[in-house]
Amino acid sequence: MVFSQRELATVLAALRFWARTGISGTPLEHSIATEGEVLRPLNMEEVDVLCERLNTVDDHEAKRVLVSVSGGVADIACDPGVEVAVFDHDAFASDPEATAGVPSSFKGLAEVLGVPVEAHHE
């Protein structure tokens, strides 16, 4: 998830306020923090860790992918932590049996582009 600087500052301020004034908060905040008594809310130390994670530059910057295509060949460069799949519609049109779909982790994206997804084998 990517936050604007204002959004991130607001989230961090709210978390710090909550940790400083008491984790229990009002019944509404308690219900939100516990998903209606399903979860145990974070304690002050866990809130501190979360704030540090949110404040880490890499955690809230958009990841980048650059795809360069030349002569029908795609070269890809991406930031660490980005999963990339390439699907060749031309190869699929020529020989659908020999052209694999993309991994199942791309299912939602694949549906948007009409790309087949590999069958999940366990």
Image: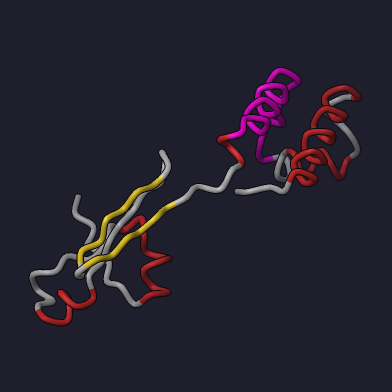
| Residue numbers of the magenta segment | 38-57
Name the residue located 68 percent from the left edge and 30 percent from the top edge. Answer: 55
Task: Answer with left or right where residue 67 lies relative to residue 57.
Answer: left
Q: Principal SS element in the magenta part?
A: helix
Q: How many marks?
A: 0
Spot occupied by residue 46 in the image (x, y as percentages of width and height): 68, 23
Name the residue located 66 percent from the left edge and 40 percent from the top edge. Answer: 38
45 relative to 80, above or below: above
Most distant residue in the top direction: 45
User: Viewer-proximal residue, 18 or 70?
Assistant: 70
4 relative to 50, above or below: below
Q: Splitting the image into 4 quarters, where does residue 53 fall?
A: top right
Q: Splitting the image into 4 quarters, where does residue 73 fall?
A: bottom left
Spot occupied by residue 120 in the image (x, y as percentages of width and height): 23, 57
Task: Answer with left or right where residue 82 lies relative to residue 55.
Answer: left
Task: Answer with left or right where residue 13 lies relative to residue 81.
Answer: right
Does 55 appear in magenta?
yes
User: Viewer-proximal residue, 79 or 103?
Assistant: 79
Name the residue located 20 percent from the left edge and 49 percent from the top edge. Answer: 122
User: Viewer-proximal residue, 112 or 121?
Assistant: 112
Spot occupied by residue 81 in the image (x, y as percentages of width and height): 42, 40
Q: Splitting the image into 4 quarters, where does residue 43 fall?
A: top right
Most distant residue in the bottom direction: 93
Does 50 appear in magenta?
yes
Spot occupied by residue 107 in the image (x, y as percentages of width and height): 37, 64
104 relative to 9, above or below: below
Task: Answer with left or right where residue 69 lies relative to residue 121.
Answer: right
Name the residue located 72 percent from the left edge and 26 percent from the top edge. Answer: 47
